[in-house]
Amino acid sequence: MPPSRPDTGRPDTPAVPGATVPPGVPSAPGPADTDEVVPAATADSAAVRIGETMHRISHRLRRRHVPRLSPLGLTPAQERALRMVASAPAPLRMVELADRLGIVPRSATTLVDALEQAGLVRRTPDPSSRRSTLLLLTDAGRDLQQRMRQARREVFQEAFAPLSPGEREQLLELLQRVAAGLDGAACHRDRPADGRRPAGEHRGAGEQGAGERLG
């Protein structure tokens, strides 16, 4: 009669032909002991890859856009400011321009000073507020804005040339849904009572190069 195995408190592991289990080594867990949990990182990997790809595309679009702005005498920050003034349905106040650009009013003033000196925009008193001024495009600014629009169109056409018209529409729809979700989240963000942005939030690429070129 073979000697009995010591009681280890674990169920016997089914024997594998030709294999032995050394004494003291825990037996392999059964199917009931291995509930596989998918890591959150794996579940979110697609979102991460999409975000990283969008960031890379945005960076490359900016790099392609800058050489087309140089002949126009504009920095990227000045181009954005001029585009905001041109696209506004009504004349913007300085504080409104700063808010749309995501920069502090002081930096917006530097941008407008450069654009005004170049004859592209002009300030005019705000009839509804003595302390405010409105920003208007000049004829030269309107002409330059059209040239800027053409430069942007060329960059975007080159970038999305690999996609068919139907794929472009599908991509546009998806990105608009993402943008709407981000806009909704921004609307619910807590802000101080004075309406100012939290410290550090307003500083971005729009503040860089505000007073360069155009001079």
Image (tube, grey):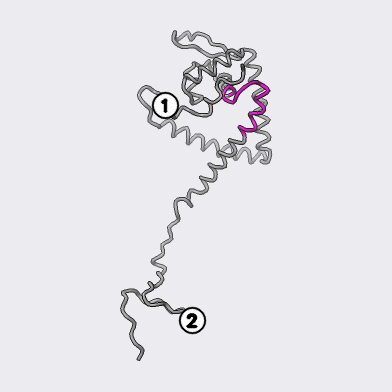
Q: Specify the label residue 71 is tagged with.
A: none
- Along the viewing direction, whichever of 206 and 14 lies nearer the viewer: 206
Q: Percent position (x, y) of residue 73?
A: 64, 20
Q: Which residues are magenta?
A: 61-79
Secondary structure beneath dot 2 equals loop
Q: From the image, tell me which residue sits under label 2.
A: 18
Q: From the image, tell me which residue sits under label 1.
A: 197
The residue located at (38%, 28%) in the rendering is 191
In this picture, is 54 found above or below 37? Answer: above
In this picture, is 180 found above or below 31? Answer: above
Q: Percent position (x, y) of residue 151?
A: 67, 27
Location of residue 27 by image quarter? bottom left
- Along the viewing direction, whichever of 205 and 175 lies nearer the viewer: 205
In this picture, is 98 found above or below 127? Answer: below
Q: Nearer the viewer, mark 1 or mark 2?
A: 2
Q: Amino acid at mark 1?
A: Arg
- Along the viewing direction, whichever of 77 and 140 lies nearer the viewer: 77
- Position of the N terminus by quadrant: bottom left
Location of residue 33 by image quarter? bottom left
Secondary structure beneath dot 1 equals loop
Query: Local crowd at mark 1 within 10 Å, few (<14), some, or many (≥20)?
Result: some
